[in-house]
Amino acid sequence: MRLALIAPPWNSLYRPSIQIATLAALADHSPGDPVTPVYGYLDWSQYAVETLGWVPAEFITVYDTIGEELYGLGVGDWIFGGPARQVETGADAPDPETAEERACVTYAAFLQEKGVADNLVRQVLALRATAPAFVSGFVGRLLALDAEMYGFTTSFSQLGPALAVAQALKARAPERLIVLGGANCDRPMGQAVMAAYPFVDAVVQGEGEAAVTALREARDTADLAAVPGLALRTEGEIRVALPVVQSASSAPVPRYEEYFERLRDLPWADLIAPHVALPFQMSRGCWWGEKLQCTFCGENGSGMVYRSKPGRQLTQTLRELTEKHGVFDTYAVDTILARRDNGLAALAAAEVDVTTFFEVKANLGPREVGEMRAAGVTMVQPGIESLSSGALKLLRKGATAYHNLRFLILCHELGIDAQWNLLSAMPMETPQMLKEQLALLPFITHLAPPSTVSKVRVDRYSPYFENPDEFRIVLRGPEPKYRFIHADPALDRTALAYSFDHAETDERPDADEMLALRRRLGARVGLWKKLHHQSRFAYRFGPDLTVLHDHRPQVGAGRHVLRGAADRLFRELVHGGRVDQAVERVVQMTDRPEAELRAELRAWGKRGWVHFEARRGLVLATRDSMRDELGRAAYLGVTGPDRDVATEPPVEAGVGGARAEQ
């Protein structure tokens, strides 16, 4: 069957959709009918700018805010109104205009209650008013493709836009088949979507390569019953074929030509093109989640089993993508970087100026982080989540505050942008977990602050959701945003929802204290963000001394010179080390009494120079050696071409010297 694959809003404007591009690439490697990728989010962007008369740069900012920051409030889904604006029927039902006005007033109040700025609320309402006309025109474009089946990817805020377009498409061409896939359709959620919205003919549950291959080979609807992972509406019921877990290598290199063709047609493409990053995938699932799933994580749904491509394919994939499109910034969509055979060493050896992004576990050591930076990894999303070892144990992170701080230090030293989040309000959190973080934060303002501070959320497929009793919580139903996304009160929102409200089952006598501490933590992180750019805590090594520059606001101790035993002890704990072993080695090297060294360490701990955890110590300062620049200069000094003095033109008078003699 001829298939069109649509990426609706709110996919990032700066990234082509890897979901539809990977499935489209199957057509280049296997028999079957053609696949046409459609970048609907670029169509929507152009339409909104032209219709509303917004400055493109302003629209891009609003678009990014809706797609990245307001997902938790359902804004992107609500703008497209779901598939139906009017849900009330009967003689007493309001007319459509009244129903829409009521919907807008109610939702605007919801956003304002959540702290969304009034100006942004007005912009959201303007986009909502514009969406129906866009949907109508966009459907005309889709019908012109003459596809037999239209597939929509639905991750994050894409379900509402997909349903709006799908319903309009089905109304105008009922013989065309509508298929949805992606994170919003995994396992029971996909069947719930079909039950709620009868114009959806099928959903693909789980990974899509095998399903799309079978769909392309199908001749008619009778061939669809055996499509892997397909929930199909047939003869008045929904029949489900089991999905298959595929190897990571089954996914081809994505085909992004259609994205760049559409991007070039944007009148303001120059605002997007310089910042495009090409998504790629080296693995699926999570090797840590297979061992011990983080309590709050529902990301992998039915695909937790970890599968990874051979590391050699990393360089091959990035070479193919960058050479084809002339874009050197790339973006891994993997849940976690492979522990072994991840291809980074080979990428570093290639000596190309490709930059990339990975999600990583934060307990990586200096060698692993150095290897990442050498391979061009300039941005990471580490699973830090907390700076309390007790809280991290509750979250099953498999790391401690020591690991997380060391990772932030290494990223600072190597110029890696660490994008991380701080979580609180996890079940069984204690006041001490919050207090120890509040005590730590003033001493680490020189390190990258978290992007957000937020309460732990209960997502479908997470251990919190699957086993709430184990964590002493009770689920209270879907988050409030779902009553706006799925406006019909007759719908089963519990089956459709991904995120849920919850409460602890045991009444806490310290509830007021916990609330006050969480508010203090949020305020302290806000101050951290303000102070970060003026905060410096760095050291430089000399032959037999260390110079420490401590200019952290409020706690900085100025410039210090460490010599002798203090110098050796400091060096022992750079990037972390066992305190007892460090002290023993320095005693042997300097003959300084152990008691004096331990007293020195206690003083460093009070100053926030060293973080202690269990039997380990970690210097919190970062190295400022200029080694990378000096090393590069030395390399060029040896290998660079010699200046050919004989061929240089004579120096003109008045420009650095007298005229050369003839």
Image (spheres, rainbow, N blue to C red):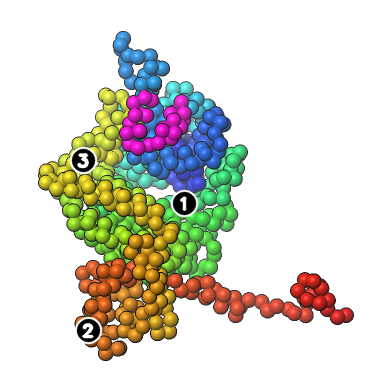
Q: Position of residue 509 (x, y in %)?
A: 11, 46
Which residue is disc 3 drawn over?
502
Q: Is residue 298 left or right of residue 326?
A: left
Asked if the stretch drawn in magenta spans residue 1, the answer is no
Vertical side of 162 occupied by 437: above or below: below
Q: Is residue 581 left or right of residue 367?
A: left
Distance of mark 3 from mark 2, alpha carbons? 52 Å
Which disc number belongs to residue 279? 1
Distance of mark 1 from mark 3, alpha carbons? 34 Å
Residue at image point 25% right, 39% down = 500
- The secondary element bearing badge 1 is classed as strand
Predominant SS of the magenta segment: helix
Vertical side of 582 occupied by 6: above or below: above
- Compare marks 1 and 3 and give the one earlier in the sequence: 1
Q: Position of residue 141 (x, y in %)?
A: 54, 30
Specify few, some or many for label 3: CA neighbours under 10 Å numbering under 14, 14-19, or 20 or more. many
The reply to whether callout 1 and callout 2 are in contact (CB within 8 Å) is no
Q: Nearer the viewer, mark 3 or mark 2?
A: 2
Q: Is residue 232 left or right of residue 377?
A: left
Q: Position of residue 420 (x, y in %)?
A: 36, 54
654, 281: nearer the viewer: 654
Q: Nearer the viewer, mark 1 or mark 2?
A: 2
Which disc number belongs to residue 594? 2
Residue at image point 81% right, 77% down = 658
Residue at image point 26% right, 57% down = 438
Distance of mark 1 from mark 2, alpha carbons? 54 Å
Specify few, some or many for label 1: CA neighbours under 10 Å numbering under 14, 14-19, or 20 or more. many
Specify few, some or many for label 2: CA neighbours under 10 Å numbering under 14, 14-19, or 20 or more. some
Residue 286 visible in the displayed image? no
Instruction: Write the start and end of the magenta stretch as one range.
Output: 104-129
Asked if the stretch drawn in magenta spans residue 112, the answer is yes
Task: Tell me which amino acid carries mark 3.
Answer: His
